[in-house]
Amino acid sequence: MRPRRFAAAGPLKGRIRVPGDKSISHRSLMLSALAVGESRVTGLLEGEDVLSTAAAMRAMGADIQRTGEGEWLIHGVGVGALLQPEAALDMGNSGTSTRLLMGLVASHPITACFVGDASLSKRPMKRVTDPLSLMGAEFTTSPGERLPLMLRGAAPAVPIEYRLPVASAQVKSAVLLAGLNTPGITTVIEPVPTRDHSERMLKGFGAALTVETHVDGTRTIRIRGEAELQPQCIEVPGDPSSAAFFIVAALIVPGSELVIENVGLNATRAGLIDVLRQMGGDITEQNAREVGGEPVADLLVRHSVLKGIDVDPAIVPSMVDEFPVFFVAAALAEGRTTTTGLDELRVKESDRIAVMATALTAAGARVQETEDGLIIDGSGGEALRGGNNAAIATHLDHRIAMSMAVAGLVSAGGVEVDDTRPIATSFPAFEALLDGLVA
Ligand SMILES: O=C(O)C1=C[C@@H](OP(=O)(O)O)[C@@H](O)[C@H](O)C1
Ligand SMILES: C=C(OP(=O)(O)O)C(=O)O
């Protein structure tokens, strides 16, 4: 464990750049490893989760080299040609690596064992074993359909039409990636839109993929299997989920004025910015452009008096990973903020509803937990005053650690986080960036 106290240290001023998008980084390694020829990726997030994906793709035959900071060269094996890994694939803390790679393996004639850390081993996998079983893959799982599990891929796999029972980009992507090496057309029906990086990147690599959006917002995504992927040069945009910690910090720490450069603003990811603006957050987009087929801008964020709101549950998928830090913003707002429809937060790296309720309460915020969200009565900009000095339990969850670090910046006595190590899964430079800003 690596504990640390985060305390108030004055306004955040200056310019920072956040690391590459985690979702896009995973996908760029996976698809490059399946293309025939050499792909080049720049701006890759070198966090532990993405490195787990790189190691797994290497173990299944891809040649993956790091040539500089964030710069990687990948020689792919071709769709259908993944090799049998010789040892278990260690997924570490990463749900995205696990579920997307299960999709890839499911339609290859190989068997792979998936293992992970204590957090990942508690997370539900039935959401992917269900559709992948329909495609012909076979599973031996730990009780409750959890890791460790063994997956025997089907060759040939059977194309399916699958309607997502949960709003999950990981489940959608698992089925689409399985569809890559499945004869015929694999179809995913998505009643609620989730992040669309897989669709964009599969098309970019030359897969025959179509997206039909119906009047009620439902999306039907079709992919033609036995695809041949063309190698690509990919520039990964900055991660809005990492930028979120600094956006909220600059909004709630008085006197702050911060530019966060190169932030991905794909509409399926940008919900936090919309909600913070509805609360009165002063966030301006500068230098809007496209990076790697994704909309990107620099964000100028100024300290703002935030007003509590009822968050529309329809926006949840586009800010699903940002709720822990959003709760910190709500704890500093004037009045009450109500969130609902957050059931999925209970099955992330930790139960993010319960863990944040406990953590923020300990830090002195007024928080009430409901079945599917939190009700937060904000301090109206007053510093949080926690009753005790006990360390906040982060439960191997990077986003809890970083969110409570941000809470420490607006806490009268500081916030002690029990373990900062998980931060390296998605944002290894987080503490250095924060320390550099407030120094
Ligand atoms: O597809 C992805 O890259 C991700 C999808 C989301 O998970 P779910 O699909 O489980 O909602 C998100 O929480 C995760 O951090 C990354
Ligand atoms: C939920 C997350 O990631 P994963 O599902 O990949 O572990 C996250 O990064 O917040």
Image (cartoon, rainbow, N blue to C red):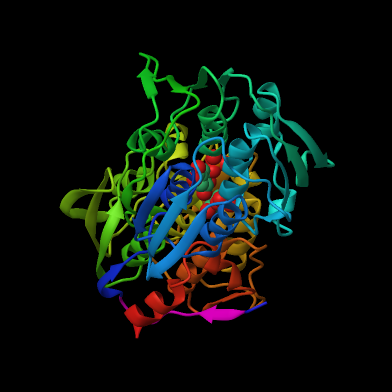
Q: Nearer the viewer, residue 349 or 284?
A: 349
Q: Residue 7's spot in the image, x, y percent?
A: 47, 80
Q: Quadrant of the N terminus?
A: bottom right
Outermost right residue: 143
Q: Residue 380's spot in the image, x, y percent?
A: 39, 60
For the point 30% across and 59% down, the residue is 305
User: Is residue 352 positioned above or below 65 on the image?
Assistant: above
User: Is residue 179 positioned above or below 376 on the image?
Assistant: above
- In the image, the segment drawn in magenta is 3-11
User: Is residue 1 positioned above or below 29 on the image?
Assistant: below
User: Main SS type for the magenta part?
Assistant: loop
Question: Does 5 appear in magenta?
Answer: yes
Q: Is residue 3 visible?
A: yes
* Residue 124 falls in image quadrant: top right
For the point 66% across and 33% down, the residue is 127
User: Is residue 203 positioned above or below 111 on the image?
Assistant: above
For the point 51% across and 45% down, the residue is 77
* Residue 217 falls in image quadrant: top left
Q: Nearer the viewer, residue 303 or 287?
A: 287
Q: Nearer the viewer, residue 97 or 324?
A: 97
Question: Does 266 appear in magenta?
Answer: no
Q: Nearer the viewer, residue 11 or 54?
A: 54
| In this picture, residue 175 sits left or right of residue 271 | right
Q: Is residue 343 visible?
A: no
